[in-house]
Image (cartoon, rainbow, N blue to C red):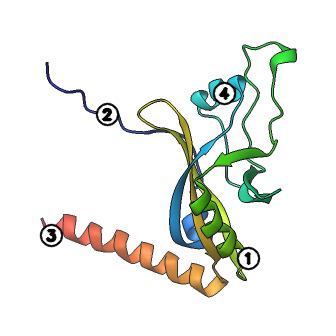
Amino acid sequence: MAPREPEPRRIAAQNRRARFDFFIEDTLEAGVMLTGTEVKSLRGGRASVNEAYAGLKGGELYLFNAYIPEYGQAGRWLQHETKRPRKLLVHRRELNKLMGAIKQKGITLIPMSVYFNDRGIAKVQVGLATGKKKQDKRESEKERTWQRDKARLMREKG
């Protein structure tokens, strides 16, 4: 019997504006502590991390302001709070590195995406980011437009 290929990760939520609004210097994969209804709701794919950020609270790393909707098939007493802080699970060495980076001026932790790995465990991809200024955003837009036009020209030429 041939070995099974791992299935690609299934994205539950993605922050598409992160690369437009921030310079992403480094990324890190972190586990996230969720309740049962949060996992079920994430599998539905209606979560949002667009306005979320990660930060320190009590010496631990938390994901703040991430929206995971209530799970419709569960009763009212089983529901979770939609925007509660969720603890991110990282190794101590990674946490120390992130704490040092956060204390620098202008460095932010931005969640890039929430996905399920090949074992079915929810993970968060966190980016170490600095904010872009208006002219940087314009430059990114020009670069993206040029790449699109270049691809179109190459297609037309054959």
How far is mark 4 from mark 3, CA to CA? Answer: 47 Å
Q: Which kind of residue does numbered mark 2 sit on?
A: Pro
Secondary structure beneath disc 1? loop
Of the numbered discs 1 and 2, the one sitting upstream in the chain is 2
Alpha-carbon neighbours of circle 3 within 10 Å: few (<14), some, or many (≥20)? few
Which x, y percent locates residue 110? 64, 61
Mark 1 touches mark 4? (CB < 8 Å): no
Nearest to viewer (mark 4 / mark 2): 2
Nearest to viewer (mark 4 / mark 3): 4
Secondary structure beneath disc 4? helix
Q: Residue furthest right?
A: 77
Which residue corresponds to mark 1? 103
Quarter location, residue 5: top left
Of the numbered discs 3 and 2, the one sitting upstream in the chain is 2
Which residue corresponds to mark 3? 157
Which residue corresponds to mark 4? 41
How far is mark 1 from mark 4, CA to CA? Answer: 34 Å
Circle on res. 6: 2
* Residue shown at the point (61%, 57%) measured from the top left: 92
Nearest to viewer (mark 1 / mark 3): 1
Nearest to viewer (mark 1 / mark 4): 1
Q: Which kind of residue does numbered mark 1 sit on?
A: Lys
Secondary structure beneath disc 2? loop
Of the numbered discs 1 and 3, the one sitting upstream in the chain is 1
For the N terminus, the quadrant is: top left
Task: Please indicate whether residue 47 sits to the left or right of residue 151 in the image.
Answer: right
Nearest to viewer (mark 1 / mark 2): 1
Quarter location, residue 145: bottom left
Task: Please indicate whether residue 24 sits to the left or right of residue 148 in the image.
Answer: right
Mark 3 touches mark 2? (CB < 8 Å): no
How far is mark 3 from mark 2, CA to CA? Answer: 38 Å
Q: Which kind of residue does numbered mark 3 sit on?
A: Lys
